[in-house]
């Protein structure tokens, strides 16, 4: 007993080392991977984790995306969105959808302590805050706009209750490639866990459902209404929605306070709140709280976990 306690203490004081409690990956570590896949270089991973493969969809030129803009413009949809949204916040989605395509990025990690293959799917690029620097547009403005455009296109699909097919196709291709890489490297079948934040959470959940694997997600918009569409995707004909049982899926999502994103659709699996529910009794009727998405960002969610235990903090 003393030896075990000493070992745990020794692990905790080692800089950059991640100790597993009961030899498992903690929710905080999954959140770290979901943050790391945004690829901004600011997240340092525990030494237990090693990236084995990354994947980014090949980009077309900005001119190629603009080529079909006029042909894609649907004024009826513009008017329809305008009627439904007094502030006109959604109208921008249409123009962006016309020039958007793909934009998927994912990374696969090996947890050397457990042997898990963890596939992290990137969410929507958070680029708005970086557009302006010292009152001047930065030199990568065009590329940043394009990246944001691609993701907002997929966000619009999710808003409409549809699978963001371009990114989902790429996510599935990457998952297949990651598992092949694992088999070649370790000569065995991997235990696969998908993870991701926001848009990445949707991709993670859909992949887990189709593969009958596990997903740990953060700030998911809810994949409930999207699942039926899996049966309509040609290459995915083995999935039978009629036999699908949402109560048996191995999906856990961690959500901040109710907001426009994490209450968008019905969730499947288990939802764990990262807030004290007794303080938010009127969350869905409180318009200001519902609209507030300040807690949606992955950096904000990371602060809601205890780094030592890896579990949500006790409020």
Image: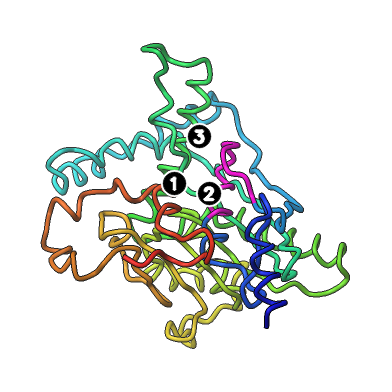
Q: Position of residue 258 (x, y in %)?
A: 25, 60
Tell me whether circle 3 and circle 1 mark residues in contact (CB < 8 Å).
no
Camera-side residue of 276 and 159: 276
Going from the N terminus, do you reach mark 2 or mark 3 first?
2
Tell me whether circle 1 and circle 2 mark residues in contact (CB < 8 Å).
yes
Question: Which stretch appears magenta?
Answer: 32-45
- Residue 147's label in the rendered image is 3
Q: Position of residue 221 (x, y in %)?
A: 36, 60
Camera-side residue of 79 and 315: 315
Quickly name the residue at label 2: 35
Tell whether 37 sits left or right of 244: right
Residue at (52%, 64%) from the top-left corner? 310
246 versus 232 height, above or below: below
Residue at (41%, 34%) from the top-left corner? 71
Q: Is 305 included in the stretch rendered in magenta?
A: no
Q: Position of residue 69 (x, y in %)?
A: 42, 31
SS at circle 1: helix
Camera-side residue of 273 and 163: 273
211 versus 301 height, above or below: below
Q: Quadrant of residue 195?
A: bottom right
Going from the N terminus, do you reach mark 3 or mark 1 first?
3
Quickly name the residue at label 1: 299
Tell whether 219 sits left or right of 92: right
Task: Describe the colour scheme in one phrase.
Answer: rainbow
Quarter of the image with the C terminus is bottom left
Instruction: Give the CA separation, mark 1 to mark 2.
Output: 7 Å
Going from the N terminus, do you reach mark 1 or mark 2 first?
2
SS at circle 3: helix
Q: Position of residue 123 (x, y in %)?
A: 48, 49
Q: How many marks?
A: 3
**Crowding near pointer 1: few (<14 within 10 Å), some, many (20+)?**
some
């Amino acid at each position: 007993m003393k030896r075990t306690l000493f070992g745990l203490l020794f692990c905790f004081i080692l800089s950059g080392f991640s100790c597993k409690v009961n030899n498992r990956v903690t929710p905080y570590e999954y959140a770290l991977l979901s943050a790391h896949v945004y690829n901004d270089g600011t997240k340092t991973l525990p030494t237990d984790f090693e990236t084995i493969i990354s994947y980014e969809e090949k980009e077309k030129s900005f001119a190629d995306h603009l080529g079909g803009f006029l042909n894609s413009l649907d004024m009826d949809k513009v008017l329809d969105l305008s009627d439904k949204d007094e502030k006109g916040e959604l109208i921008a989605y249409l123009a962006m959808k016309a020039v958007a395509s793909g934009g998927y990025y994912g990374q696969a990690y090996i947890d050397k302590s457990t042997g898990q293959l963890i596939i992290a799917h990137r969410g929507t690029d958070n680029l708005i805050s970086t557009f302006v620097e010292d009152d001047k547009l930065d030199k990568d403005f065009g590329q940043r706009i394009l990246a944001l455009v691609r993701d907002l296109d997929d966000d619009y699909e999710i808003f409409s209750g549809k699978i963001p097919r371009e990114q989902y196709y790429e996510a599935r291709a990457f998952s297949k490639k990651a598992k092949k890489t694992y088999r070649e490297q370790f000569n065995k079948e991997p235990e696969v866990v998908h993870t991701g934040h926001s848009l990445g959470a949707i991709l993670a959940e859909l992949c887990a459902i189709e593969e009958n694997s596990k997903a740990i997600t953060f700030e998911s918009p809810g994949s409930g209404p999207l699942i039926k569409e899996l049966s309509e995707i040609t290459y995915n004909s083995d999935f039978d929605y009629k036999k699908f049982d949402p109560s048996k899926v191995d999906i856990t999502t961690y959500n901040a306070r109710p907001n426009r994103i994490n209450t968008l659709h019905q969730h499947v699996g288990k939802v764990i709140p990262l807030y004290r529910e007794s303080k938010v009794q009127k969350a869905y009727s409180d318009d200001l709280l519902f609209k507030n998405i300040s807690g949606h960002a992955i950096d904000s969610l990371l602060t809601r976990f205890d780094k030592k235990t890896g579990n949500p903090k006790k409020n």
